[in-house]
Image (tube, rainbow, N blue to C red):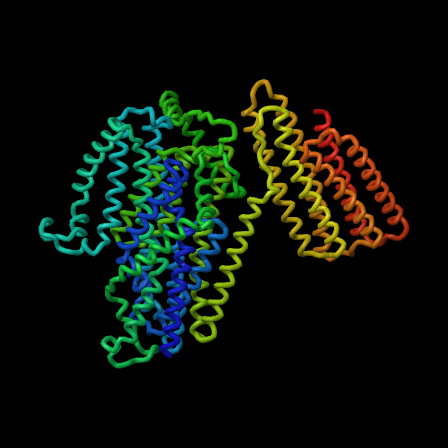
Amino acid sequence: MENTYLWMIIALAVLAIADLIVGVSNDAVNFLNSAIGSKAVTFKTIMIIASLGIGFGAIFSSGMMEVARKGIFNPGMFTFDNIMIIFMAVMITDILLLDFFNTLGMPTSTTVSIVFELLGAAVVIALITIASKGGDFSEVTNYINTEKAQIIIFGILLSVVVAFSVGAFVQYITRILLSFNFEKKAKWVAGLFGGVALTAMVYFILMKGIKGADIAKEHLAFLGGETIKDYLEANVLPIVAVSFVIWSLLSYILVNFFKVNIYKIIILVGTFALALAFAGNDLVNFIGVPIAAWQSFQAFVDPLINVNGLGATEFTMDVLGKKVPTPTLLLLIAAFVMILTLWFSSKSRNVLKTSIDLASQGETKERFQPNFLSRGLVRGAMMISKYTTIITPKSFHDKIEKQFEKPVIQLTQGKTHELPAFDMVRAAVNLMVAGILISIATSYHLPLSTTYVTFMVAMGTSLADRAWGSESAVYRVAGVLNVIGGWFGTAITAFIAAGIAAYLINWNKEVVIPILLLLAVFLLVRNSLNHIKKSKETKAEDSLKRTESKSVQGVIEESADNISKVLKRTSKIYENTINNLINQDLPELKKNKKAVVKLESEIEDLQNNIFYFIKNLDETSVSASTFYIKVVGDLQDIAQSVALISKISHKHINNNHKGLKKSQAKELKEISKNLKNLFAKIRSIFELRDFDKISPILEEKQELLKTVSSYAQKQVERTRTTESSPKNTTLYFSILLETEDLIKATIDLLEAHASK
């Protein structure tokens, strides 16, 4: 029997490494988004500072491991067998849940997932134990540390509201005082801001770092016999006051005499502090459970503890209720895995992009669609703003508005992407406020969700900084609501999934654990392969690029590549749709629909760029805008025609209607073949920029139009004589009509280039 538990310990060790990888991929957003979003320093520097923070934080995180051992349930009420089942269920569920969110690119809380997984698995095992003893299910409260669990859950939920509100308030006040032209303010202003920010962050580091180290628990003579931990807690105000004076003076000296950008220093210190907090606070979420399982196993096999040689189903786990230090070597190994993941995980970049895009001061490609709730919230906020403006004195209102005027940043052609998502003041406030809030939570030994705090602070500062303007507000608010909804989904899913896993493992460990582990490996590999595939599609050679030229000739040159790519993809989609319709291949028709949606999305992105394209033009090249609008419009017509053909074909087969007749299939195959050959010739023209060959192609296009028209006439005759399926007739005519529109849109595109 002991061998079974030994194998479970080995499995948990492997799961711990996997959990570290998926966990860091999700939580990297906590401490990287402000530094990367503001582009204060190079990406490499940010990563080095964050890696150092993770290293120190991991070493100081031993105390938080108590949460996994006794924070959620009362270990003395469970046997060793129960505990191992709970821990195994929790780890398998945690990895799958976090990897799912990483694949979606959504930041979620590793703290919430681990808390609710422990709660779900413990409740199920407690109920099973009570039922086996013939007890009352109300006794479950004896098994669960309800008071501590309630405090943790309440603290996590409250942090959402508090972090957003405090972030918005502090950013609003800061922006009024500093404005967007903060670099032109007096040197003493930067020094004072540096003093406030660095004081908050250094105190944060003391609370999260030194306070958690073993030396902080030793009684020191120079502190009057007090420990560092007790001294920090008893002298908060004096420490903060002295730190403020020292850091303000030092900041002023650095700004005034050494011309140092104090905001960059704040961002670097803040990144280090939050990385330290992440490792110190969240490491328990990844390795706390496996370490607790290992320590449980040690106690079970130790004859000095298990003196009576009790079996796994009899030996109770009171030992977990005691304070047990975590070996430093394990913490260092965990830190090493976390740092490697930070540097090499592509999924962490995906999650990071979501957070930065939602907080961006400028325009980004919005990935979330507005909903009735986001529209309602935005309308309500606009109404409040309107009435506030009415009752506010005009002079005061004008002063406030002046502080929110953004400076115009001139960039060379094609360098728009190099603009930071937000400025260094907002990045500094993000880090400072998040640090303060996490420090307060840490002082009360709450495993606060650093994801919730950092994300909601960033959203609050975005709102206060007016990053959510009328052009983007409904999308950004919808994004925030989606992320928050995902958090609540995490809690519910974690509770239920861990409970089910615990029930199955308890039923038959030897059979269920290998099955669940294989399932976990399969899902992780599948998600990774899908992520790699999706990343490749994003970088695909046929993806469309925005035009940034200022002349008609430049627009022709840059648009030619896009036209060639659109025609190539359209030809492929059209051919596949016709073939799959003839073969009645529903799965492939569904794939075609997805390919069309992606094409339409990319063309829509080109259309959304028209405003910025026109703004970027020289006065002497305004005619280029008309030509560019014409090109994008034709591309949109082409995509819409092939999209409708794909949609109606999929709908026809999906509804199990009659397939095409042989004559219809033959005619469509001929059209598809001719269209493919024609599109290949047109693509060659645009790839080689050989526009002199457009005239012969136009004649060929007219011949194809006549062919399509003749087949439409044939179908009319068939309908009058032999055709018996209304759905079939409707489908065939729809395909022919949309094919005509597709050809005409292509002709318009060619004629536009022939005239240039």
Q: Residue furthest top?
A: 620
Query: What percent of the width, then of the height, locates residue 639?
Result: 67, 40
In this rendered view, identify the residue nearer to me: 503 or 514: 514
Q: Is residue 255 visible?
A: yes
Q: Is residue 30 above or below residue 6?
A: above
Q: Residue at x 40, y 41 (%)?
A: 43
**Residue 611 showing in the rendered view:** no
* As drawn, 380 above or below 133: above
Instruction: Tell me the quarter of the picture where residue 460 sits.
Output: top left
Query: Is 627 placed above or below 353 here?
Result: above
Indicate the quadrant where residue 176 lies.
Answer: top left
Image quadrant where one finds the C terminus: top right
For the point 64% across and 47% down, which residue is it? 595
Q: Position of residue 52 (x, y in %)?
A: 31, 48
Q: Classify residue 690 by image quadrant.
A: top right
Q: Position of residue 417 (x, y in %)?
A: 48, 34
The N terminus appears in which quarter of the rendering?
A: bottom left
Q: Nearer the viewer, residue 95 or 21?
A: 21
From the viewer's perspective, is residue 314 above or below residue 748?
Answer: below
Q: Is residue 607 left or right of residue 185?
A: right
Q: Position of residue 112 (x, y in %)?
A: 38, 55
